[in-house]
Image (spheres, rainbow, N blue to C red):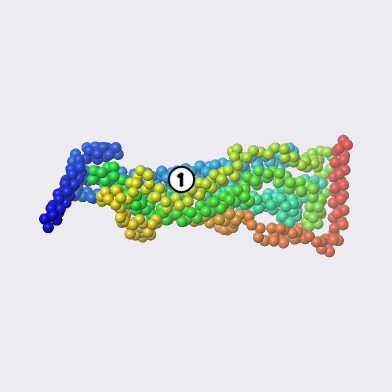
Amino acid sequence: MKSTVALSVLYILAVIFVSAKAELKTKNCNDVKEAYSSKGFNVNDVPNKGVHGAHLKVCPQGFSCCTLEMEEKLSQQSRSDLKEPVSRLSSNMQSTFTQRHRHFDQFFRELLDNAEGSLHSMFVRTYGQMYMKNAELFKSFFQDLRRYYQQGSAVVNLDSMLGEFWEDLLERMFRLVNVQYEFSDAYMECVSRHTEQLRPFGDVPRKLRLQLTRAFIAARTFTRGLALMGEVVNKVSSVSASPSCVRAAMKMMYCPYCSGQVALKPCPNYCLNVMRGCLANQADLDFEWNNFLDAMLSLADRLEGPFNFESVMDPIDVKISDAIMNMQENSMQVSQKVFQGCGQPKLSKSFSRTSRSIKETGFTGRFRPYSPDARPTTAAGTSLDRLVMDVKKKLKHAKKFWSTLPDTVCEGERVAIGDEECWNGTAKSRYESVVMNSGLANQVANPDVEVDITKPDVVIRRQIVVLKEMTTWLKAAYNGNDISSDNEEDGSGEESGSGVCESPPCEGDMYFSTTAPAKPNVRFVHQETEGTKAAAPAARANLLLALLGLLLVLLETHWR
């Protein structure tokens, strides 16, 4: 009995001794003065010895090295300290994809410039004055491609633009190869209205339409996605911390100062709960963010493969030249079909068998084939494959950025090594609370941050909607379709271009189902009807006489 009493007395004395020693240490605020002044505050704010902390609103009361004024200043400091790592990580992310967007955008624009310059140089060498007199057609072609890339389907419909280009080219070439005839506007409308069915340029227009629409839609949508990433990160990272979050951060980071334990760091799990509460809304962005990144990666694969912008634009001069050659080689057959369908044109009154007439038309009778001796260098001295390979790594690394942000913040020197001897919010001890999962809904029972789960952040919810919409556009671009409208006037809701050939007209036969002009009223078919059979001999005879006349002109010019 006596021994038990003695042990109890000794235990009480030991507790009193330890408490007294701790109190003496607490009353000495020299370390707090140094740490407090290192934050840029006036050292005179710190009492020389500990004072009673009944006045404190956040930190534990009792003897403390903090005054109410110090607590308020440290609370403001905690707001900045809380924002710093989030802003830094977000800024790095934003900078990464802003730079990639600039690289891709510059690359695509330079490829367009190079393609136009290459076509001009090649066509000057190949077609001479005939090209120079019609150069505005090709200049307008590239201008429209640029306008689509910059402004989208609300300004330029790729399908319509490409169709008009080939119609205009056919009209100009048809006049050149039939220089001895006069053609009214109504007659040329009949010709241009059936460009696709006549197929004067072979299969080049159909293939080029598929390649250009797919490549341009993919390139434009992908660069828009890269630009959007920077915008989303910027807006989300600018969301201010709630008062309850600032209070929790203050308690986690600076309440150890008040107890005189300036070197004491928060427990890792304690930090996680605080940060997951503070960044709960940001974590909810993660689902659509990851869906968006998956769509970007899928479209990047397309850019490396069938929708490769570089492989389409680099040889576009050769492809258009092949189409022109095809028209030249088949000009007699094309002209015969037109004469049968649109009627026999009248010989030009101004046409005379002189070399002057030929020179005035600009038709030399010679289409020199292009010899691909030197191709233009790729834009910016790089290649699309290298750009895509680089950005795919960055996109994969950006996955789960928002949900793992608290884990990224609560590591390294910001927290204690373990959860045993660390600041748990009230004292130097073990942190016992369960760590909450990420997301707003999971913070209803967060022990360290008061989170109102009924009031999601409006800015972040808006960015979730923006990401979801962009993901839809990316998935459409993956299939070769442009469903974006840029919020501009485009009430039709029509898609611009399709990379998928889903209907019989993709192959196209010679039957003209389109309404023909009032005069002449015709339709073309593969097989001749009885009426056309009767008219065919006369049409052929007229065509042969016209060609014979042209041949005589050329021979006369040659012998002169």
Whether residue 18 sits left or right of residue 162 in the image: it is left
- Tell how many labels: 1
x, y percent for residue 287: 46, 56
* Residue drawn at x 66%, y 43% as measured from the top left: 314
* Residue drawn at x 80%, y 61% as measured from the top left: 527
* Residue drawn at x 34%, y 52% as measured from the top left: 269
Decide if residue 373 is in sight here: yes
x, y percent for residue 435: 35, 56
x, y percent for residue 103: 54, 42
Q: Give the position of the C terminus as an image quadrant.
A: top right
Whether residue 433 sits left or right of residue 105 in the image: it is left
Q: Is residue 240 above or below residue 521?
A: above
Whether residue 530 sits left or right of residue 425 in the image: it is right
Q: Give the position of the N terminus as an image quadrant.
A: bottom left
Query: Residue flagged by tag 1: what amino acid is it?
Result: Met
Quarter of the image holding residue 261? top left
Q: Secondary structure at mark 1?
A: helix
Decide if residue 245 is in sight here: no
In this orientation, which residue lies closer to the viewer: 253 or 159? 253
* Residue drawn at x 31%, y 43% as measured from the top left: 77
In this orientation, which residue lies closer to the viewer: 155 or 351? 155
In this orientation, which residue lies closer to the viewer: 459 or 359? 459
In this orientation, which residue lies closer to the viewer: 183 or 510? 510
| Residue corresponding to mark 1 | 93
The extreme bottom residue here reads: 530
x, y percent for residue 271: 34, 50
How many residues crowd around disc 1 within 10 Å: few (fewer than 14), some, or many (20 or more)? some
The extreme left residue here reads: 2
Q: Is residue 498 above or below residue 118?
A: below
